[in-house]
């Protein structure tokens, strides 16, 4: 009676069979299930239905593994390397942001700090060096000029507002980037409430650029969004900054900018301090692209502003 | 939760090693993210978001515990917060859960045909259906099935990732797998890979053959199964 009832329960509730397949049964459970599957001696026959149930569950599991892994590998835009580069960049940016917060905390503590805070500061310095080296390497070869301001400007003075030469200021923000304040694309899109115009980061990713994050920059009494991207990876990685602003409130002009037509778009293109810059407008929104790339590529990125999202 | 226990700075991994170890699980995280969001771009955003959060919370990770499970928990929570404000917990007696899905719903020979179609050319179509059926599962079933069958987490780890009891994990796995197999069966039936089975009184004839009548109350977990068995003795 007891064995018959137990065996019937195993057939009725395949959770036991599943726990067996998942390796979750203890020794007693294993004996019960194997007795059920193979027959308990006394000439009893094993359960064909449960045998088939196990085979079907195993086959489905193999299919699932193939389906999930294959689909994931096929769908990563730009492949696994690009995804890995994007993830590493975002994590490093977060680490840098934390380190910067620690530095600010250090100043706020009026010089009194614990030895443990020195570790993240050293880490931040190393990362800043890496970030800087990655961005400047290719520029040096082209004869990059020194930035207008010393590199030792503090976050406080950078955030105090832009000077009169707005173009040079934006290029300085590109060449000496602070870590992004937001890395989640949906948070970046939500910056429109600070800027007063839509912020659509995805359209600039069509070049293969990957969004690292964004900051809000004070520009006199107004604000602009600075979208930070990377293109490529490893030694050939380049940085790209797209400034989004309300052109009725902020005007970016400069003697070095000359008009150029890219497709149907009108773009102002120039080069300053070794970086290329491209400025355009679309639908009442201003865009300024600063990059480590050539002027042609910056102009093409800026022209994407005229495509739909 | 052992893997989420707060740790001191001394226990925190060095940042570079931590970053690399996290990125080592990128493929697995992205695979699950693709299935959760059903959109490659959103999946990339979700993975990036989860890894940034992991970086932010790395002091909470206890070295020596399961980093992969910890990352999956962050990914799951990020997904819930971002896309499913209502969370994973929902009424368990709605939709597919309301269907008793009695075991023994098809015969052993039908199951044999399902796992091993005679025409090998049909196999990719059957696998395609597995993918579609997986996408159609309620999120909590889909997540449990992927975490167990693809990522091979233990019930205990899945319970920690999904923040639910082990019995609930078993139930979600069971329901998810059952729905997948039923979808597969219906697809195979439509393709003519298997023949339909005559239904008798709400159950298939095969179910009756297998001695599987609808149980008035199926055991919820191993403990209750054993309790019932003891009562039967």
Image (cartoon, coloured by chain):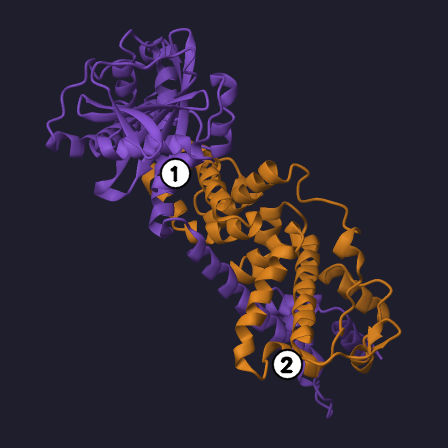
Chain colours: A purple, B orange
For the residue pair B70 and A134, the one nearer the viewer reads as A134
The subunit letter for the residue under badge 2 reads B
Name the element at disc 2: helix
In percent of width and height, residue B149 lies at: 56, 62
Name the image quarter holding residue B81. Answer: top right
In percent of width and height, residue B135 lies at: 61, 56
Residue A221 placement, left or right of B157: left
Residue at 45 percent across and 20 percent down: it is A284
Label annotation for residue B113: 2
**Residue furthest toward the right?**
B201
**Residue A1 visible in the snapshot:** yes
Relative to A222, does residue A55 appear above or below in the rendering?
A: below
Residue at 69 percent across and 75 percent down: it is B189
Q: Does the CB distance between marks 1 and 2 fall below 8 Å?
A: no
In percent of width and height, residue A81 lies at: 33, 50
Relative to B80, does residue A259 appear above or below in the rendering?
A: above
Relative to B175, does residue B93 appear above or below in the rendering?
A: above
The residue pinned by badge 1 equals: A205
Residue A46 placement, left or right of B162: right
Q: Quadrant of the N terminus of chain A?
A: bottom right
């Amino acid at each position: 009676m007891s064995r018959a009832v137990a065996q019937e329960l195993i057939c009725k509730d395949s959770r036991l069979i599943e726990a067996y397949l998942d390796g979750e049964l203890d020794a007693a459970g294993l004996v019960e299930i194997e007795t059920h599957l193979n027959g308990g001696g006394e000439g009893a026959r094993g359960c064909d239905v449960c045998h088939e149930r196990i085979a079907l569950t195993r086959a489905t599991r193999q299919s699932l593994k193939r389906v999930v892994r294959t689909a994931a590998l096929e769908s990563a835009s730009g492949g696994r390397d690009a995804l890995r580069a994007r993830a590493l960049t975002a994590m490093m940016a977060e680490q840098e942001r934390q380190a910067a917060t620690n530095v600010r905390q250090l100043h706020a503590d009026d010089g009194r700090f614990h030895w443990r805070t020195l570790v993240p500061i050293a880490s931040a310095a190393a990362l800043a060096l890496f970030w800087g080296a990655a961005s400047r390497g290719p520029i040096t070869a082209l004869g990059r000029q020194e930035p207008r301001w010393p590199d030792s400007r503090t976050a406080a003075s950078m955030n105090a507002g832009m000077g009169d030469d707005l173009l040079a200021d934006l290029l300085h923000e590109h060449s000496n980037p602070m870590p992004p304040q937001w890395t989640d694309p949906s948070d970046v899109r939500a910056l429109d409430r600070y800027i007063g115009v839509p912020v659509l980061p995805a359209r600039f990713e069509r070049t293969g650029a990957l969004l690292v994050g964004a900051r809000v920059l004070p520009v006199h009494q107004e604000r602009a969004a600075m979208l930070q991207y990377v293109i490529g990876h490893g030694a050939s990685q380049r940085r790209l900054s797209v400034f989004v602003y309300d052109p009725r409130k902020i005007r970016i002009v400069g003697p070095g900018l000359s008009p150029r037509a890219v497709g149907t778009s009108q773009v102002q293109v120039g080069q300053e301090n070794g970086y290329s810059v491209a400025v355009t407008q679309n639908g009442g929104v201003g865009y300024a692209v600063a990059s480590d790339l050539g002027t042609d590529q910056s102009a093409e990125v800026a022209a994407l502003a005229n495509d739909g999202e | 939760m052992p893997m989420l226990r707060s740790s001191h700075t001394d226990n925190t991994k060095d940042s570079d090693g931590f970053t690399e170890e996290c990125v080592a699980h990128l493929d697995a995280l992205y695979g699950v993210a693709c299935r959760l969001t059903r959109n490659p771009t959103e999946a990339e955003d979700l993975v990036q978001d989860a890894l940034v959060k992991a970086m932010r919370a790395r002091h909470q990770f206890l070295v020596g515990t399961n980093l992969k499970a910890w990352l999956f928990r962050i990914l799951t929570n990020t997904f819930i917060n971002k896309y499913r404000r209502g969370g994973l917990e929902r009424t368990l007696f709605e939709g597919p859960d309301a269907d008793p899905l009695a075991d023994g719903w098809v015969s052993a020979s039908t199951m044999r045909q399902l796992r091993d179609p005679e025409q090998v050319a049909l196999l990719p179509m059957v696998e395609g259906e597995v993918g579609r059926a997986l996408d159609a599962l309620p999120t909590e079933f889909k997540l449990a099935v992927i975490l167990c069958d693809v990522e091979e987490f233990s019930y205990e780890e899945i319970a920690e990732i999904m923040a639910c009891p082990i019995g609930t994990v078993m139930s979600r796995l069971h329901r998810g797998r059952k729905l997948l197999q039923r979808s597969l069966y219906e697809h195979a039936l439509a393709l003519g890979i298997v023949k339909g089975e005559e239904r008798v009184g709400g159950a298939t004839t095969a179910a009756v053959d297998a001695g599987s009548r609808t149980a008035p109350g199926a055991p919820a977990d191993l403990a209750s199964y054993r309790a019932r068995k003891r009562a039967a003795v």
